Image (spheres, rainbow, N blue to C red):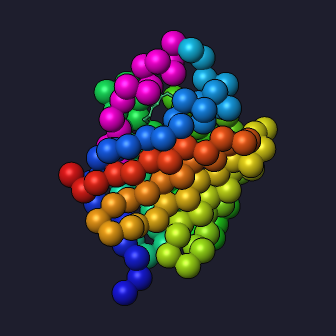
Amino acid sequence: MPVDFSGTWNLVSNDNFEGYMVALGIDFATRKVAKMLKPQKVIKQDGDSFYIHTTSTFRDYLLEFKVGEEFDEDTKGLDNRKCKSLVTWENDKLVCVQTGEKKNRGWTHWLEGDDLHLELRCENQVCRQVFKRA
Ligand code: ECB
């Protein structure tokens, strides 16, 4: 059975989100609000087609992509940058490389037990998020 990330997921832990936001150049006031949030992710997966909607009381972010097809990403409402993004499978992990102004930018999703993990990378910072099914 191939891995299926579909579902509604609630954030339960968020390690070094501050460092990740600093690396992205997010201002102090926005960071103070953002780090209090408990975002929810709604993921719809149809084979290699993904819809990932991250929602919160402050900002929302929608990403739709097909694994293996590079796309233009505009991180509107986050750090408001444009990058070329490519998501690939590395075994059962979903790995995104976001090529643009920021070095070493990307993220990885995987399932571990009943949990959804997300590692967010930018420059020398790594944020680790864990989600549980709603
Ligand atoms: C959308 C909820 C978070 C809103 C935070 C608001 C301001 C902070 C600005 C920038 C911080 C950078 C990223 C926020 C962290 C998570 C949002 C989605 C990260 C992401 O790209 O997730 C991927 C993988 O699930 C799908 O887009």
Queried whether the magenta region covers residue 38, the answer comes back as yes
Could you tell me residue 121's position as x and y percent? 63, 47
Residue 128 placement, left or right of 73: left
Quarter residue 19 falls in? top right
Residue situated furthest front in the rendering: 15
Residue 63 seen by the camera:
no
Quarter residue 23 falls in? top right
Could you tell me residue 74's position as x and y percent? 61, 39
Q: Measuring 51% from the left and 12% from the top, which residue is drawn there? A: 29
Q: Measuring 51% from the left and 18% from the top, which residue is drawn there? A: 30
Quarter residue 6 falls in? bottom left
Could you tell me residue 26's position as x and y percent? 61, 23
Queried whether the magenta region covers residue 13, the answer comes back as no
Most foreground residue, 43 or 16 = 16
Q: How many marks?
A: 0
Q: Does 3 sit above or below residue 120?
A: below
Residue situated furthest bottom in the rendering: 1
Residue 115 placement, left or right of 14: left
Q: Does 25 sit above or below residue 46?
A: above
Q: Does 41 sit above or below residue 57?
A: below
The segment highlighted magenta reads: 29-41
Could you tell me residue 112's position as x and y percent? 39, 67
Most foreground residue, 6 or 24 = 24
